[in-house]
Structures are given as C-alpha cells and as structure tokens.
Amino acid sequence: MLATALARFPRLVLQPSATSLDFLPRLSAELGRAVYCKRDDTTSLALGGNKVRKLEYLVAEALAEGADTLVTAGAIQSNHVRQTAAVAAQQGLDCVALLENPIATRDPGYLRGGNRLLLELFGAQIKSVAALHDPAGQLAAEAERLRQQGRTPKVIPIGGSNARGALGYIRAGLELADQLQALELQPAAVIVASGSAGTQAGLDLALDHLRPGLPVIGITVSRSNAEQLPRVALLRQQLAELLGVAAPRNAPILYDGYHGPRYGEPNAGTLAAIRRLGRLEGLILDPVYTGKAMAGLLDLAARDELPPGPLVFLHTGGAPGTFAYGDWLA
C-alpha cells in the first residue's frame, strides 16, 4: 500500500539505484554488537547526501509549476543548499540561497571552503543574512522580490523538509526494508541525525508500516527534545495525510544530549566520533549532523540504553562540509 501511495507523486530521478547497506566490522567488534551503515552519503549528486532524496520530489514539483528559480536557505556550510544548487544547475534553473553564519566564526575555511566553495561552482546567487530567525517568512519575501522582477520562483524549505520532500524518505524506507529482508536482518533500531525533521519523519512512517516495532531513533543536532519532538510528529502526520495512510501511534523517539553547544558547532564527543569512525572504518562523518548522531549511537550503546541486537546507522552525508572544520579536527 505504501509503495502504491508513493507512486502517485512525480519524482525527478536523481538517485537511480539503492544506496548500499554496509556492515562495519571493526566498529562492531569494538562495540560487541553488529552495526550496519545505510550509505546515503553516497547518493549520486554533488558529493552525496540525504537531501537528494527530498529534492527528487521537490524539484519535480517545481518543474511541473514552471519555476525558473529555486529559492532556499541554510547555514554557510549547508549540505541542503549545496545539493539544491547542484540540482538547479543540472536542470537549467537559477538558485538563490539565503545563508547565515550560525556559529559567528571568522574562520576563512568555514566562510569560503567546503560547501560554500561548491555553491560558487554551481553558480548559486548568495544572499547573506544576519540570522534565519523566520525562515519561512524570509524565503517568502525573497520569492516575492523575484516575482516582482518577472521570475517564477519555487521555495524549497530548509532541509527540504516539508511533507512533499519527506516522500524521499518513504522511498528510502522501502529501500531499506528490502535490504533488511535480503540480509535476513532483524535490527534493534535505526539511528539518524534529526535536524529539519524530514528524514526522521519519512523513515519513521515508512518503517512503521513495513517493519512494525523497529524504532527509528533521532539524535537531535540543534534542539532539545521538547522543541524537536513536535516538529517530527507534525511532519510525520502531514506526510501520512499526504499519502493517505495511517500515521504511527507512538511518539517519535529522540535523544538531545549530543547537539551542544549549538547547531553547526561540534563538541568533544562529536570530534571523537568522527576520528573513531575514520580510524576504524575509513568512514567520513561531518561535524554538524552525522558526527553528533554517531556520538549518540556510541554513547547510548556503551551505556546499554539501546535495545539489544544489530544497529543501523543512516549516514546522511556532509563530507564536503567536513573540510570547512579544519581548526576543530586538526
């Protein structure tokens, strides 16, 4: 039923094949339990990442509406903005991006390297803002400015996280369920970074239908549980309504002990997790999302706060941004 409901929505095929589900043998040996990694850092556009899945649905909608410009927003090192700009370039669209500096740094590597450098290569028009204090309102105002110039803009929300964008993680959930079946794997939990909420909401809804009882655990990267839980729950409900399927009855599962000191700024646990996965598995994590999510997985596993059995870590990408954090990682 879920696959049939999803098929009603147009999709711009940017990721034509499944990303792999890889066993992490050396990390598993250290933890004393099997850990698998769903490699959404290897999606096929602009050095990979989870936003490609959301943009498949969002940009299909933009093209159907005759848009000539994608308008979005994020941090200077936003993975979402990088991938949105790349899709715009690929489809012959303009891209306007509102960028903030959430950690108030003057580090030239952060300000000009990593994802920010790639925006230049993709031809995005950058507008610096003091803060994204009202992202929806700021994006709407920029879209109106463009309409006054005779353009046809399409707003792409931060992180690609509305119900339409979250369809991408319904598709990912179908993909993951097939891979688990092929491996005859019964994981105890799926761990994912929880930021703009679309990835967790889509995956949670999908697996609630496909693998009832398999928890999707979000590690928050910018907010407390009290702030993040209603965002995930609302988006999950909106997505269920869009698809015409039942929403999960249980509240989303979140842990908020790993996101400090603030969004975009790594802490000691984040940096340790990045170094540990690099040393053990040659796997690149980023300081904003996957480093914090892996720090959560490692700590919760060490304290026996996760259900017993294999774990699946959803790698949402972010490798280009890692190169902007040399002062933290050196």
Image (tube, helix red, strand yellow):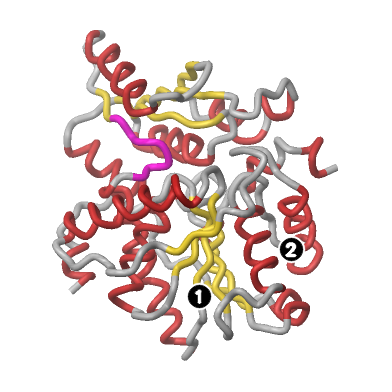
* Residue 75 relative to residue 198: left or right: right
The span from disc 1 to disc 2 (Cα, nearest Å) is 19 Å
Residue 249 place in picture, x, y as percent: 27, 69
Q: Which residues are magenta?
A: 155-161
Identity of the residue drawn at 28% across and 68% down: 248
Residue 189's disc is 1
- Identity of the residue furthest to the right in this view: 330
Q: Secondary structure at mark 2?
A: helix
User: Which quadrant is home to the N terminus?
Assistant: bottom left
Residue 234 position within the rendered picture, expressed as x and y whole percent measured from the top left: 29, 51
Horizontal relation, residue 273 to residue 192: left or right: right
How many tags in the picture? Answer: 2
Instruction: Report the front residue among 111 and 291.
Output: 291
Residue 30 image position (x, y, % from top left): 78, 78
Q: Dot 1, crowdedness within 10 Å: few (<14), some or many (≥20)?
A: some
Residue occupying image coordinates x 53% and y 73% = 21
Counting from the top left corner in percent of width and height, residue 114 is at: 65, 35
Which one is in front, 299 or 203? 299
Q: Residue at x 38, y 71 (%)?
A: 175
The local crowd at label 2, few if under 14, some if 14 to 19, many if 20 or more residues have their Cα within 10 Å, is some
**Rendered image quadrant of residue 35:** bottom right
Q: Amino acid at mark 1?
A: Ala
Q: Earlier in the sequence, mark 1 or mark 2?
A: 1
Q: Nearer the viewer, residue 90 or 118?
A: 118
Q: Quick one: which residue is furthest to the bottom in this view?
A: 184
Q: Is residue 99 magenta?
A: no
**Mark 2 = which residue?**
277
SS class of the residue under badge 1? strand
- The three-letter code of the residue at mark 2 reads Leu
Residue 158 is a magenta residue:
yes
